[in-house]
Image: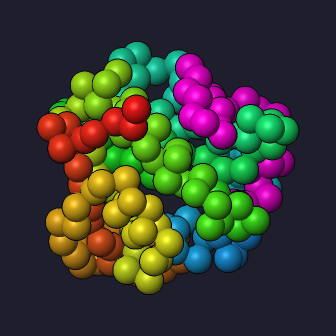
Amino acid sequence: MRLETNRLIIREFVPEDWESVHRYASDPKVTRYTLWGPNTEEETKDYVAGMKAMQQKEPRTHYEWAVTRKTDGELIGGCGINVSGSNGEIGYCFHADHWGQGYASECAKAMLEFGFRQLGVHRIYATCRPENIGSERVMQKIGMQKEGYLREHMPTNKGGFANSWLYSILSHEYVPES
């Protein structure tokens, strides 16, 4: 599977991607607000192998992709949508060198399009840590509405539990770009 936006190619992971993924997945700045990381090389290799195995599942409910720039093919991040019933959860993570350039919003819009148009979900949601203002702005920019504050709802591999903002958008609220 492969999706394209104006500037990005969103494609399935391949085993050789692990080094590019590791460049951001091992960065404490990037993983500051994640439930995982910073990754060891082994953890990143296991992640990419897991994503490759996920591609073979039938029916497929988890879609995790590598995000590359069209201009040079550089893998700059990852994104995905995970489906459960009529709901989809999107997520994205980018190398810090590519923050603030609109890539996360562009990628997240592609996840909405894929979720609503190809997977037929009714509601797509996303969460972020309350301190992660950049991610919250992405959710707002793509038309999601804040639903609430989830208190200590997810355990982290860093010890303890994470609080999150919850945002969502419904299929009838979604307006694709023309």
Image location of residue 18, percent across then percent down = 77, 44
Image location of residue 14, percent across then percent down = 73, 29
Instruction: Please name the residue shown 18% across and 44% down the image.
Output: 173
Can see residue 165? yes
Can see residue 51? no
Image location of residue 162, percent across then percent down = 37, 76
Instruction: Please name the residue shown 40% across and 16% down the image.
Output: 58
Q: Residue furthest front?
A: 178
Indicate yes or no whether the magenta region holds residue 37: no
Q: Quadrant of residue 26?
A: bottom right
Q: Quadrant of residue 164?
A: bottom left
Image location of residue 101, percent across then percent down = 64, 61
Number of marks drawn = 0
- Identify which residue, 172 or 148, lies in the foreground: 172
Instruction: Please name the residue shown 62% across and 67% down the image.
Output: 100
Instruction: Please name the residue shown 72% across and 50% down the image.
Output: 76
Indicate yes or no whether the magenta region holds residue 6: yes
Is the residue 153 above or below the residue 92 in the image?
below
- What range is drawn magenta here? 1-26
Q: Quadrant of the C terminus?
A: top left
Q: Is residue 43 left or right of residue 86?
A: right
Is the residue 41 above or below the residue 114 in the image?
below
